[in-house]
Image (cartoon, grey):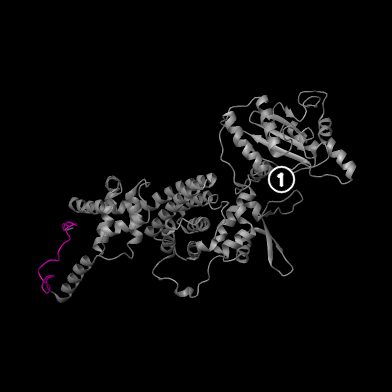
């Protein structure tokens, strides 16, 4: 059940005309009162032919008129309007049940507390099976204004109790960090203009897409302008930026004026203070030109930044910062990924926007490495190779899973749901990204004897997950990858241990695929296999001398550890 309190109005008669009218699309059927502050003597234009909307409006506005006469200062924000709607799959409620619901909601809101004979006047109008509209005039019978600050939270909590009592679909409790739902007028306007999104939704996507490109709020506003977003700035006498509003081109008032929305009204984490804290948290680099090994791409750097995420989840403020930065990384990756992956990655970015914020205040500097990695990606001139992108998407998938677990442990129900939805999109992207490598590796899987030896490595390195790995459809490809790694001088046993240390395999659908992406990433600089290196050195030296590999070396082979079988020739 959703109760959406609307902004305060001043025209009681005008709102009644809408509630008792046919609706904008002829959807209002049989409008009539189901409840009110005093049903006896209440005119109901829906059921009484003699009653008029003007009579009902005067009846509700009487305390307002008396207050205005007494104080001489007219009240102009006295119309409280709250539609209450059940879910599509819920059973239709009777008029009696809707009346009980309305009474509980006005009591929770502070409009008409139980037992208060001097409360505000209110009515509940039903003109459809699945919802009612509650209208109240917010001047009490004694002339005072009701205490309705924070009524949205109280009404939401009461709706959760009503859902249990009436056996309706149970929604999750709000926490004050969600975005405002599009209004009916916003949705109708988008439909009329042929827009797929309302203006605030469109602006939210554009602003989030711009964040990885900016180092401070001034750069961000400049990026907005370059992207075609209309911006209205509020600056102090010193020129300092104090606030901003954003508008969608073509979103105009009836007078042809641009409509603007404050950043915090677009989404809670897009207000100027929140953006400034995030953008200006990146620690300046003393020597940016020598910061990293230039052979390492931004895609690998981003995966490296994610690798330590699971080890530092004890400080809530730091974790919240990491997940906010993770959203920026997903968005940056979506912008630079190949075209066939962008749909899933953009869907993941949109879904994760809700998981980026909670009531826990973030220590933004804790996510410096992750946020910098996102900026490096959007400014890189080249796209990723297949293995680097597969490793990054798999790492983002694991991070989204961790975000869902953390939010669930903290009781953040909406954020946990958003993280799970993100993981579904990232899983699809991960499967798509890895598919070419799986096909290529599977086509050249090693022989049966070599696979048996590699299976022993798997059982020795990962005994708890060995059976699942060896029966996974990706095992032949993993065996081929391990063979390649060993040929390059690495120890398969050690690579498996290093890969599994970065991501637990118990919850992985395809543990062999997870290991492939991890090994492709960690095998770039692991501890080398000294025996394999020595054998390769002997072969290279012998070839240079034009003699057999054993001509200048002792004939006694190096002792093989008893814990590892001698490998067959491959």
What kind of element bears circle 1? Answer: loop
Corner quadrant of residue 68: top right
Give the mark count: 1
Who is closer to the viewer here, 349 or 177? Answer: 177
Q: Position of residue 537 (x, y in %)?
A: 20, 71
Q: Is 557 a magenta residue?
A: yes
Disc 1 marks which residue?
A: 149
Query: Is the residue 219 above or below the residue 361 in the image?
Result: below
Residue at 72% x, 39% y is 110
540 lies left or right of 168: left
Corner quadrant of residue 97: top right
Image quarter hosting the C terminus = bottom left
Q: Is residue 260 visible?
A: yes
Q: Position of residue 164 (x, y in %)?
A: 57, 32
Q: Position of residue 454 (x, y in %)?
A: 23, 54
Magenta: main secondary structure: loop
Q: Which residues are magenta?
A: 547-568
Query: Is the residue 545 above or below the residue 204 in the image?
Result: below
Query: Is the residue 235 above or below the residue 402 in the image?
Result: below
Corner quadrant of residue 41: top right
Who is closer to the viewer here, 384 or 41? Answer: 41
46 lies left or right of 537: right
Query: Is the residue 324 above or below the residue 31 in the image?
Result: below
18 lies left or right of 383: right
Q: Residues within 10 Å of mark 1 (few under 14, many from 20)?
A: few
453 lies left or right of 180: left
Image quarter hosting the N terminus = top right
Q: Position of residue 360 (x, y in %)?
A: 56, 53
Residue at 58% x, 51% y is 359
């Amino acid at each position: 059940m959703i109760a959406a309190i609307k902004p305060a109005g001043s025209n009681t008669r005008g709102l009644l005309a809408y509630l008792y009218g046919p609706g904008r699309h002829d959807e209002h059927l049989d409008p009539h009162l189901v409840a009110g502050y005093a049903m006896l003597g209440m005119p109901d234009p829906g059921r009484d032919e003699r009653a008029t909307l003007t009579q009902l409006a005067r009846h509700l506005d009487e305390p307002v008129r008396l207050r205005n006469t007494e104080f001489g200062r007219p009240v102009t924000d006295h119309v409280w309007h709250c539609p209450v709607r059940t879910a599509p799959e819920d059973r239709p409620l009777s008029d009696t049940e809707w009346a009980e619901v309305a009474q509980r909601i006005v009591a929770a809101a502070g409009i008409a507390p139980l037992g208060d004979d001097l409360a505000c006047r209110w009515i509940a109008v039903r003109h459809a099976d699945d919802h009612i509209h509650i209208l109240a005039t917010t001047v009490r019978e004694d002339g005072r204004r009701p205490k309705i600050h924070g009524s949205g939270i109280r009404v939401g909590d009461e709706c959760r109790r009503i859902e249990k009592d009436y056996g309706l679909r149970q929604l999750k409790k709000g926490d004050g960090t969600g975005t405002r739902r599009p209004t009916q007028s916003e949705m109708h306007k988008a439909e009329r203009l042929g827009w797929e999104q309302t203006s605030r939704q469109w602006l939210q996507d554009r602003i989030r897409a711009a964040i990885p490109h900016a180092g401070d709020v001034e750069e961000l506003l400049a990026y907005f302008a370059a992207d075609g977003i209309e911006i209205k700035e509020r600056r102090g006498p010193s020129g300092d930026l104090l606030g901003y509003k954003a508008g969608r081109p073509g979103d105009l008032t009836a007078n042809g004026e641009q409509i603007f929305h404050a950043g915090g009204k677009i989404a809670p984490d897009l207000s100027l203070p929140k953006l400034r804290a995030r953008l200006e948290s990146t620690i300046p680099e003393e020597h940016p030109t020598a910061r990293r090994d230039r052979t390492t791409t931004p895609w690998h750097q981003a995966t490296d930044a994610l690798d330590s995420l699971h080890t530092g989840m004890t400080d809530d403020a730091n974790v919240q910062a990491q997940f906010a930065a993770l959203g920026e990384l997903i968005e940056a990756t979506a912008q630079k990924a190949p075209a066939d992956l962008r749909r899933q990655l953009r869907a993941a970015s949109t879904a994760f926007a809700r998981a980026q914020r909670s009531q826990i205040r973030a220590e933004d500097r804790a996510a410096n490495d992750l946020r910098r990695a996102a900026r490096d990606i959007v400014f890189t001139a080249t796209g990723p190779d297949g293995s680097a992108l597969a490793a990054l998407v798999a790492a983002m998938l694991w991070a989204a899973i961790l975000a869902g677990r953390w939010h669930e442990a903290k009781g953040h129900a909406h954020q946990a749901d958003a993280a799970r939805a993100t993981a579904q999109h990232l899983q699809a992207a991960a499967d798509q990204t890895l598919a070419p490598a799986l096909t290529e590796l599977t086509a050249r899987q090693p022989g049966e004897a070599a696979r048996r030896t590699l299976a022993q490595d798997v059982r020795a390195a990962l005994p708890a997950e060995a059976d699942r790995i060896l029966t996974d459809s990706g095992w032949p490809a993993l065996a081929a990858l391990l063979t390649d790694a060993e040929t390059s001088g690495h120890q398969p046993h050690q690579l498996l241990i290093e890969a599994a240390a970065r991501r637990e395999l118990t919850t992985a659908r395809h543990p062999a695929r997870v290991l492939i992406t991890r090994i492709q990433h960690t095998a770039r600089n692991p501890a080398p296999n000294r025996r394999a290196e020595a054998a390769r050195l002997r072969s290279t030296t012998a070839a240079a001398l034009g003699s057999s590999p054993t001509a200048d070396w002792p004939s006694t082979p190096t002792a093989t550890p008893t814990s590892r079988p001698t490998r067959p020739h491959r």
